[in-house]
Amino acid sequence: MEPLIEISTATPSDAGIISRIAERSIRLGCAAEHRNDPRIVAAWTRRNTLAQIQPLLLDPRLRLTLARLQGRLVGTAMASVCGRIAFCYVQPEWFRRGAGRALVRDIEGWLRDRGVVQVTLNSTRSSHGFYRHLGFKQSAEAFAIGGVTAIAMHKPLVEPAGESSVRE
């Protein structure tokens, strides 16, 4: 039996933990992407400081979530009402235990509830397979942003008439 993953809406008091999860995931989990280049790491983590995250938690157009597994905060994700997933970070020692999948599924449900019909994101090369497994498709050729390769991806949130798929 898989362990229960709890997803909750982040609150302003969670800004610090969100910042720490993002930084740790970037520094350790994304090392293949940034190759431990201090300039790339600094540029990437600069967007996830406490000062950057605090105002996001007050914006009603955004959903920031936290994932708990075995009582520990292990991941965080953010999306906007326009249908864009801005990030999904899981602490490296908790990879491949379902937290990332649960975070994305929660975000997709939140977007569906708001009438969004397609979700988009930019994936790194190392997370490309993860998103493909969740049904995302590549939208364009890979491109460089901030010293890291990004892959634009999308996924319809509504099924075309007459089609259905098995849900996890």
Image (tube, grey):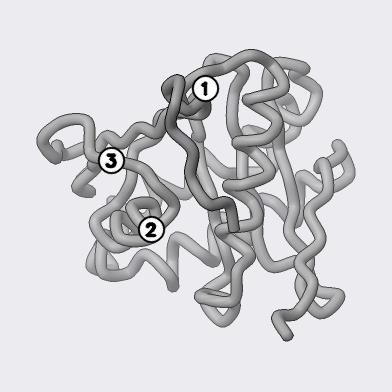
Mark 3 residue crowding within 10 angstroms, few (<14) / some (14–19) / many (20+): some
Q: CA distance from mark 2 to mark 1?
A: 19 Å
Give the residue pinned by disc 1. 83
Viewer-proximal residue, 95 or 105?
105
Residue at horizontal 14 percent and vertical 40 percent from the top: 142
Report x, y in % for residue 74: 69, 68
Give the residue pinned by disc 2. 133
Report x, y in % for residue 148: 23, 48
Could you say which disc has been placed on residue 129 in the image? none
Image: 68 above or below 149 = below
Q: Give the residue type that dot 2 points to.
A: His
Q: Give the residue type that dot 1 points to.
A: Gly
Give the residue pinned by disc 3. 137
Image: 61 above or below 54 = above
Quadrant showing the N terminus: bottom right
Q: Give the residue type that dot 3 points to.
A: Lys
Residue 34: tell me if it is visible.
yes
Quick one: label 2 or label 1, which is nearer the N terminus? 1
User: Along the horizontal axis of the image, is 24 left or right of 161?
Assistant: right
Residue 39: tell me if it is visible.
no
Mark 1 residue crowding within 10 angstroms, few (<14) / some (14–19) / many (20+): many
Q: CA distance from mark 1 to mark 3?
A: 15 Å
Residue at horizontal 57 percent and vertical 58 percent from the top: 101
